[in-house]
Amino acid sequence: MNLFEITSIFYISLWIIVVVIFNLKILDDNYTILLSKFFILPNWSFFSPHPLITDYNLFYRVVDKNHSQNEYLKVEFANSNKMSHIFFNKGKRKTKFVLDTVLDLIEELKKTNKNDYKYIPYSLQYLLLLNYIISEITAENIKSVQFKICEQSYVNNSEKIIFQSFVHDV
Amino acid sequence: MSEFLNITLNQAFYLTEKVSLFGFLILCIEDIINYKDFKSNGIYSWKVLSARKNKNFSLILNNWIPIQILLLVTCLLTIFDFIEFKAISFFVITLYFIFFQKRNLYGFDGSEQMLQVIFLLLFFKSLSTNATFTLIIYYAFITQIFVSYFFSGYNKFKGKLWRNGTALNKILNTESFGNKKYSLILSKNLKLSKTLTYGTIIYQMIFPIIMIIPNYEIRLTYLGFGILFHTGIGLSMGLNIFIYSFLAIYPILLYFIQNG
C-alpha cells in the first residue's frame, strides 16, 4: 500500500471513532463544531429520542390597503402521504425544512427572556418563516401581514397557539 | 437460494453504487422541480439564509439550482458508466451534501446522511484498486452501517414514548410524517402498535449482533426483514430516499453475511 492509502485508512478509522463518540452524545458543543470541520458527523437518531407527535401549522392574516383585515388562513406546507411517494415525493423536503425552522424558533423562544422578545424578529428562523409566508400570500394590495404557529395534537384533538408574530409591512 | 444470492465484493460495491446514485438522482429531480422555493422569495431563500455571519462560497450557494442541474448530469453520466474516473463524481456529490447543510441549515434528513456516508466511502474506494485497501473500505462500510443501526435503536430506547410503546402510533398520527390509514389500524390495535414500536428498537439495536452470529439462514432472514422494515417506513411516511439510501447498503451486507 502506498502513502495515500495508508493516510486514507488512518482518516477513515479516526472518522469511525469520532462518529461513535458523537452519537454517544458525550461531546461538548464546541468539540462537535470543531470535529464537524474535519469529519462528516451523521446523527443516527431517526425520530428519537423525542419523536414529532404533533403538527405545527402556520397561519397568516393580512391587512389590505383599505385597512380591512382578513381571517387567519392556513399555509399548506405538509403534504399528506400517498403510495406514489415511495417513488417520488417532492414535498417532503419543504415539510422537513419548515418543521425544523418552526421547532428551532420555538427553542429560541424558550431560551429568550420575555424582555428580549423584541429581538426575535431578527432571528434567522423568524425571517425564514416570514419570507416564506409573504411568498404564499395570493391576495393583492396587501399592506401588512402577521403570522402565528399553532400546535395541533391529534391525541386529544386540540390546537393551541404557540407563537404569534409582530405585524409587518409588506 | 444461497447460490442465487451469491455475489462478489465488486458486484456488491457496484450495486451499492447504482442504488445510491439512483436515490441521489431522485433527490436532484425533486429539488430541481421545486426550483421556485430556492428563489429569493422562496422558503430556501439564500437572501435570508445568508443573513448568518458566514457568507463564504456565496457563488455556489446562491446558484443552487444550476449547481443541482450539473449534479444531475454528473449523476446520470456516472449511473450509465460514462465517467471513467468515478472518484470525481463521488467527491462532488459528497461536497454537495456538505454545502447543502451549510446553505440550508434545516431540512437535511437521516437518509441524506446515509447517502453522504456511502458516497464518501465510495470516493475512497474508487481511488485505489489495491485489494487490501478495498477490503478495508468494505469493513469501514460494515462498521458505519452497524453504528447507524445500533444508535438509531439506542436513541429510540432513550425516548419515553418509544419505551412505552406509543411512539410509532403517535408519529403516524401526524399530518407531517404520518399516514391516517396506518395510524387508524394501530389506534385500533394497541398490541400491534406496541409490538411494532418495540420491534423497531430491538431490530435496530441487535442488528450488528445478528449479523455476526454464525448462522447464515438467520442472518439472511434478518436482512429480508430489513428490506420490509425500510420499505414499510418509506411507504407509510412518504420517505422515498430513506428506502434507496438504506437499500443501497444491502448488497454489501449480503456479501458480509456470505463471507464475513
Image (cartoon, helix red, strand yellow):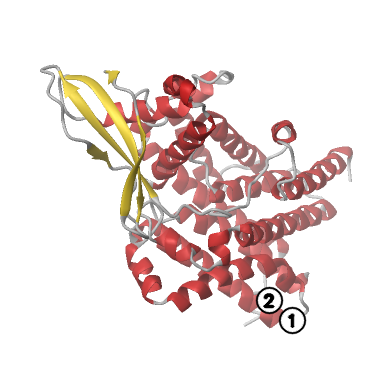
The answer to whether B201 is drawn above or below residue B132 in the figure is below
- Residue at the front extreme? A115
Question: Residue under mark 2: which chain is it in?
Answer: B
> Residue B24, image x and y in percent?
51, 47
Instruction: Please give the name of the residue rendered at 70% of the width and 47% of the height, measured from the top-left corner.
Output: A25
Q: Is residue B4 visible?
A: no
The answer to whether B142 is drawn above or below residue A93 in the figure is below
Instruction: Please give the name of the residue rendered at 85% of the width and 43% of the height, measured from the top-left corner.
Output: A10
Of helix, strand and loop, which one carries label 2?
helix
The residue where tag 2 is placed is B219
Which picture quadrant has residue B145? Answer: bottom right
> Residue A99, image x and y in percent?
43, 42
The residue where tag 1 is placed is B215
Question: Residue under mark 1: which chain is it in?
Answer: B
> Residue A153, image x and y in percent?
36, 54
Q: Quadrant of the C terminus of chain B?
A: bottom right
Of helix, strand and loop, which one carries label 1?
loop
Q: Are marks 2 and 1 in contact (CB under 8 Å)?
A: yes
Which picture quadrant has residue A84? Answer: bottom left
Q: Nearer the viewer, residue B177 or B24?
A: B177
Q: Are marks 2 and 1 on the same chain?
A: yes
